Amino acid sequence: MLNFIEIITNILDEQGKTPNDLFSAGVVSANNFYKYKVRYPSLKTLLKIANFLEVDLDYMFYISNENNFKRYSSDQSKFYDNLIGLIRLNNLSLRQFCRELKFARANLTRWKTGTSPGIETLFDIVRYFNCSFNDLLTRENY
C-alpha cells in the first residue's frame, strides 16, 4: 500500500497548499484524512480530493509523470461498463478475469448495480490490464 497521506502531502506542497486547505474546503475532515495512514479513502472521497487538487489519478499514484487532469464525475456508474469493455478487449471471460484476479464473481454484480470498487481493487485492475485509471473511471464533459 502506498502512503496515501505522503502522496497527497507532496502534491499539496507542490501547489503551495497544506492539508488544512482540504479540511477548510470541506473535501475531507482532518479526522478522516489522518485515518488514511492505514487505509485508502473511498473512491468517492478520492475523486473529491483529485478534483480539488486538479490532479489526474495516474499522476497522483506515479503511473504517469504528466498531469492530464480532467475533472472526475461523482457518478461512477459506468465503471462496470468500462471494465467489461476492457475484459472483452482482452478476449477474457468474466470467469477467467475473476479467477486470475482472485475476485469473487459477486463483485461484478455489485459493480453492475452501481457499487464502487475499493482503491486497492482499482489498483489490481489497472495493473492487470496495464491501463490507466481513466480507462475505468468517468470524467466530466465540458
Image (cartoon, helix red, strand yellow):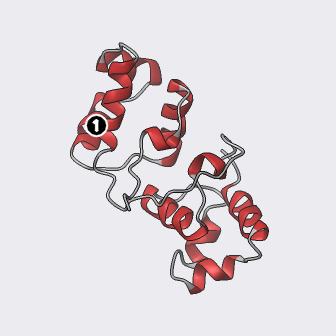
Left/right of residue 62 with respect to residue 133 in the rendered view: right
Q: Is residue 26 above or below residue 90?
A: below
Which of the 4 image quadrants contains residue 40?
bottom right
Left/right of residue 26 with respect to residue 107 in the rendered view: right
Q: Secondary structure at mark 1?
A: helix
Amino acid identity at mark 1: Asp
Residue at x 42% of width, y 61% of height: 44
86 or 142: nearer the eye?
142
Q: Position of residue 127 (x, y in %)?
A: 56, 30
Q: Is residue 85 above or below residue 78?
A: above
**Where does the C terminus fall, quadrant-wise?**
bottom left
**Where does the N terminus fall, quadrant-wise?**
top right
Residue at x 52% of width, y 65% of height: 51
Q: Position of residue 19 (x, y in %)?
A: 68, 76
Q: Is residue 98 above or below residue 131?
A: above
Residue at x 65% of width, y 49% of height: 59
Marker count (numbered): 1
Left/right of residue 8 with respect to residue 134 in the rendered view: right
Q: Is residue 66 above or below residue 54?
A: above
39 or 70: nearer the eye?
70
Residue at x 48% of width, y 32% of height: 125
2 or 16: nearer the eye?
16
Q: Which residue is mark 1?
A: 81
109 or 80: nearer the eye?
80
Which residue of the protein is positioned furthest toward the front in this rendering?
A: 142
Q: Position of residue 70 (x, y in %)?
A: 50, 57
Which of the 4 image quadrants contains residue 80?
top left
Which of the 4 image quadrants contains residue 103?
top left
Q: Tell me if mark 1 has few (under 14), some (14-19) or many (20+) residues whose alpha carbon lies within 10 angstroms of its own.
A: some
Q: Position of residue 72 (x, y in %)?
A: 44, 58
